[in-house]
Image: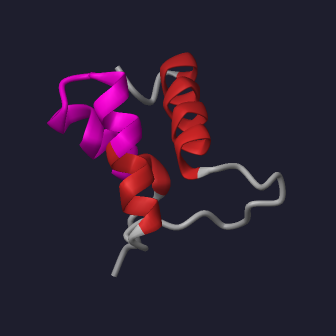
Amino acid sequence: MARTTQRDVMRNLHRRFGGDNDRIVAAYAAAERSGNVKRASNVRGMEPEEYAERLYQDGIKKGWLP
């Protein structure tokens, strides 16, 4: 069984919320808090919202989010 990656979750939320950054970031952070998505590590101690925002921006910058 293939595991769902952080990028998969972010892509699904992007589709679900039509690219609405605020809703995507909030939903991703909620998913992380509930244990539905996990980070491999959190050495910088980032809150879920900050991490979600950075992941979102990375996806836009690198093109894995439209």
Q: How is the image coloured?
A: secondary structure
Using the image as rendered, state which of residue 54 and residue 59 is in the foreground.
54
Position of the N terminus by quadrant: bottom left
Residue 7 placed where, x, y %?
45, 47
Could one spot residue 24 in this view of the protein?
A: yes
Residue 19 placed where, x, y %?
27, 22
Question: In this view, which residue lies farthest toward the bottom?
Answer: 1
Numbered-mark total: 0
Residue 62 vs residue 4: left or right? Answer: right
Could one spot residue 8 in this view of the protein?
A: no
The chief SS type of the magenta part is helix
Using the image as rendered, state which of residue 26 and residue 62 is in the foreground.
26
Reply above or below: 38 against 20. below
The magenta stretch is: 9-26
Residue 57 placed where, x, y %?
55, 24
Using the image as rendered, state which of residue 35 and residue 58 is in the foreground.
35
Q: Residue at x 27, y 41 (%)?
A: 13
Residue 15 vs residue 49: left or right? Answer: left
Residue 32 placed where, x, y %?
46, 62
Quarter holding residue 11: top left
Question: In this view, which residue lies farthest toward the right?
Answer: 43
Was residue 19 drawn as part of the magenta stretch in this picture? yes
Reply above or below: 65 against 49. above
Q: Residue at x 52, y 41 (%)?
A: 52
Position of the C terminus by quadrant: top left
Quarter holding residue 35: bottom left
Reply above or below: 29 against 16. below
Q: Residue at x 41, y 37 (%)?
A: 25
